Image: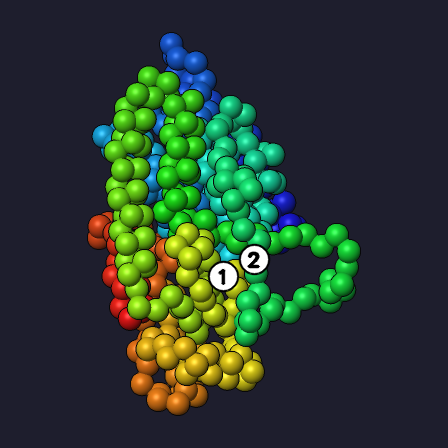
Amino acid sequence: MKKLLAFVLILTMSAFCLVGCGGAGKGSEAGSETDTSKNGDGSLKIVTTIFPSYDWIKNILGDKAETADVTMLLDNGVDLHSYQPTADDIMKISTCDMFVYVGGESDKWVDDALKEAVNKDMVVINLLETLGDSVKEEEIVEGMEAEEEEDGEEGEEGEEVEYDEHVWLSLKNAQILVDAITEGLSKIDAAGADSYKANAESYKTELKSLDDEYRTVFDAAEKKTLLFGDRFPFRYLVDDYGLDYYAAFVGCSAETEASFETVIFLAKKIDELSLNFIMTIDKSDKKIAETIKENTTSKDQEILTLDSMQGTTSEDIKNGVSYLSVMRENLEVLKEALK
């Protein structure tokens, strides 16, 4: 991966050199200073990797979102954990005014990309870094399959800790991250700072209101445990409201086949807790959930899906999907799942 990224970076920077030798660009017309960060019309250029931060940015920008150039790199349903940047992606990052990314294991490529940035004044926001000590390490709960270690890694001292990257699935985290993004936008466009802060406060009111709804629902819920026949990216959400969970894999796992032991454990746990629902995440083929169901005593559980927003596309956005709409839909699913 590192060799591939290095090659992409070389190609990208070579393209910049060719453009620079070819004459005046948009920002170097007569009477204007060269500007590699903003578009020729002075509009903001913002790049983010994932959908939630893209939607937060749009809400904070408000009316200015219509003139800003906001790019979501993972726009075609590619999962964060398998995404690899193209030369065009790196070029967009290199010249933007602000870059927002998650900052976990899946974003190891970002460090190399930022080293080659043309705009040295760009504001960079790492979501995990912003949240600091509230970021959670990945955990293996009872019955969950640990990922297989690569040859030579098991037992090594100083092994790097892996953190749960799915910080956007906490409405509490979202409010903190909106503040950080607002501060970043105010740095690159001081003239719009008051507007951004007002928009952010209004948006955070909606986030807080939905957070309160979640709390009310879970406080009154008949059951307090979720069981996922799938990966589990919702740890921040369940921890916010004191729920318990069982799952086949951690949220960042690349595994797709559950062992017999895992399936049987989860099936017995459903029987033990009298759970009526088995959970999956968006884009799941539901095979593991179906197998768990077939190994329960009653075999009559319903399979429900929670949207982790890891596969949201540009087409979904055009159709009106937003961070708040997904979180509201997830709440409706959870109301059912905890009966």
Q: Is residue 52 above or below residue 234?
A: above
Q: Nearer the viewer, mark 2 or mark 1?
A: 2
- Of residues 88 and 128, the one nearer the viewer is 128
Residue 146 in view here: yes
Image quadrant where residue 63 sits: top left
Q: Is residue 10 above or below residue 45?
A: below
Amino acid at dot 2: Glu
From the top left corner, tell me how far across and down residue 40 is, in percent: 36, 24
Residue at image point 73% right, 65% down: 154
From the top left corner, tell me how far across and down residue 13 is, in percent: 57, 35
- Of residues 135 and 149, the one nearer the viewer is 135
Crowd band around label 2 with a 10 angstrom C-alpha radius: few (<14), some (14–19), many (20+): some
Q: Is residue 321 left or right of residue 24?
A: left
Q: Are marks 2 and 1 in contact (CB under 8 Å)?
A: yes
Residue at image point 27% right, 27% down: 198
Image quadrant where residue 34 sits: top left
Indicate which disc residue 12 carries.
none
Residue beneath disc 2: 138
Q: Is residue 63 left or right of residue 17?
A: left
From the top left corner, tell me how far across and down residue 286 is, in percent: 39, 76
Residue 331 in view here: no
Amino acid at dot 1: Gly
Indicate which disc residue 251 carries.
1
Residue at image point 41% right, 87% down: 296
- Of residues 196 and 143, the one nearer the viewer is 143
> On the rendered image, what quadrant is the C terminus found in?
bottom left
> On the rendered image, what quadrant is the N terminus found in?
bottom right
